[in-house]
Amino acid sequence: AQRVTQPEKLLSVFKGAPVELKCNYSYSGSPELFWYVQYSRQRLQLLLRHISRESIKGFTADLNKGETSFHLKKPFAQEEDSAMYYCAPGAGNMLTFGGGTRLMVKP
Amino acid sequence: AAGVIQSPRHLIKEKRETATLKCYPIPRHDTVYWYQQGPGQDPQFLISFYEKMQSDKGSIPDRFSAQQFSDYHSELNMSSLELGDSALYFCASSLVGVRWRNEQFFGPGTRLTVL
């Protein structure tokens, strides 16, 4: 069965601190992996995808196939990073969302 | 740039009534997805359509049906509404055939409240 686990429901850090949002997945085949973000009162939007190996807003995510993890990292958190973050593996035409992690960056 | 449009944004219905939610994908997108997000829950995939044909089916109740029309907009029809159907319903669209076929663009959601 396809499963995504984001173990932390809430992550609270101070501005300038490093951030790591964890994501572990159990998926048959080779899914595409995404991180979606939802800022307050805004729609879900794509943050980054594993295949492009890009850095968006200072965030990066490395796919570790051995550990089946796709953790999201940022070396220095900013207050505007406060949002809900969803890890979402995709296969076929379907995304499976993890439970989400609410990131709160305090001044 | 044009985004995914959903209407209505808010809907209040009573138990056993019916509801129709509409989704207008980004122009030239050929795939539409519907998700349900209950209070305090993560989005759950309901159903998707590619080129007006159902492509994947998730945890969609039998009381719900959906279709994609010739102009690619989609409607989610919900009958015999129950209190537990109260949720935020997201629509997303994508363009299958490009490299990252699962990059989905989400609408703002329709908040359905069943009384």
Image (spheres, helix red, strand yellow):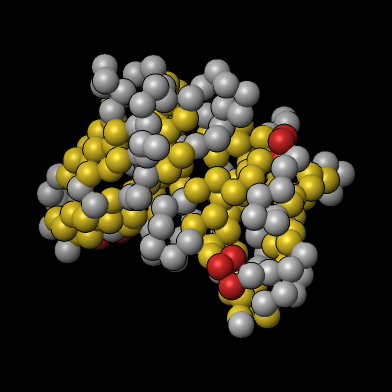
The part of the image, by quadrant, that contains residue B6 is top left
Image coordinates for residue B13, horizontal then vertical, percent: 14, 55
The part of the image, by quadrant, that contains residue B34 is top left
Q: Is residue A11 above or below residue B55?
A: below
Can residue B76 be seen here?
no
Can residue B24 be seen here?
yes
Residue at the image position 42 percent from the left and 43 percent from the top = B106
Q: Is residue A70 above or below residue A84?
A: above
Residue at the image position 47 percent from the left and 30 percent from the top = B94
The part of the image, by quadrant, that contains residue A30 is top right
User: Which quadrant does the N terminus of chain B fall into?
Assistant: top left
Residue at the image position 79 percent from the left and 44 percent from the top = A63
Image coordinates for residue B68, horizontal then vertical, percent: 30, 24
| Relative to A2, B92 lies left or right | left
Q: Is residue B52 above or below residue A57?
A: above
Image coordinates for residue B109, horizontal then vertical, percent: 33, 50
Residue at the image position 35 percent from the left and 50 percent from the top = B108
Image coordinates for residue A66, horizontal then vertical, percent: 87, 44
